[in-house]
Image: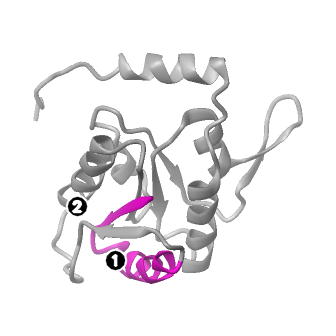
């Protein structure tokens, strides 16, 4: 599997750490930048490249993007047709649903939403927590449940072809 990664200056150090660790997993790592620590760079310049690469090879690739909170990075990635990016920025990966079932936030990104990009909030998690989350993300399969497929298909209609308004 190809793992496309990208970050601005805020997540740069975490990206560099994970790039080395993920290389040990026998995956091909494609770094879309930033290639140096520059506090004046802008995350869309790097995140868009990751999202486009994953969208062009959805069966064989995943994306990992980094930023301060991960929110803007996920918003950027989700502008690309075919991308389903979710954010992880908490130390407690588990949550409880209304029925009292415990869910893992990271694995549910894959199981329920077939997320193909994970966005990490570098200001909120350690490198080790990020590595654990990415391993879960990469190793968790999509459930293929009909209800999740139906919902994902509806997501594609939420992003019509349009030109940027800004």
Q: How is the image coloured?
A: one colour
CA gap between label 1 and label 2 equals 11 Å
Q: Quadrant of residue 101?
A: top right
Identify residue for label 2: 46
- Residue 41 part of the magenta-drawn span: no
Residue at image point 31% right, 65% down: 6
Label 2, residues with CA under 10 Å away: few <14, some 14-19, many ≥20: many
Span of residues in magenta: 1-24
Membership of 2 in magenta stretch: yes
Given residues 37 and 84, the one toward you in this image is 84
Depicted 76 relative to depicted 156: above or below: below
Residue that mark 1 sits on: 12
Pinpoint residue 137: horizontal percent, then vertical percent.
58, 55
Q: Nearer the viewer, residue 89 or 141?
A: 141
Which secondary structure lies at badge 1?
Answer: helix
Quadrant occupied by the C terminus: top left
> Element type at marker 2?
helix
């Amino acid at each position: 599997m190809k793992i496309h990664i990208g970050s601005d200056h805020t997540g740069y150090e975490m990206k560099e750490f994970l790039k080395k660790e993920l290389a040990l997993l026998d995956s091909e790592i494609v770094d879309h930048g930033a290639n140096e620590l520059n506090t004046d760079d802008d995350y869309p310049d790097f995140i868009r490249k990751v999202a486009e690469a994953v969208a062009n090879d959805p069966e064989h690739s995943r994306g990992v993007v980094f930023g301060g909170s991960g929110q803007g990075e996920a918003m950027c990635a989700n502008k690309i047709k075919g991308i389903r990016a979710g954010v992880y920025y908490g130390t407690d990966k588990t949550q409880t649903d209304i029925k009292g079932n415990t869910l893992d936030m990271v694995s549910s990104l894959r199981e329920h939403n077939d997320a193909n990009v994970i966005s990490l909030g570098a200001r909120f998690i350690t490198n080790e927590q990020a590595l654990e989350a990415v391993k879960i993300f990469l190793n968790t399969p999509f459930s293929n449940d009909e209800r999740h497929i139906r919902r994902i298909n509806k997501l594609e209609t939420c992003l019509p072809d349009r030109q940027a308004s800004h």
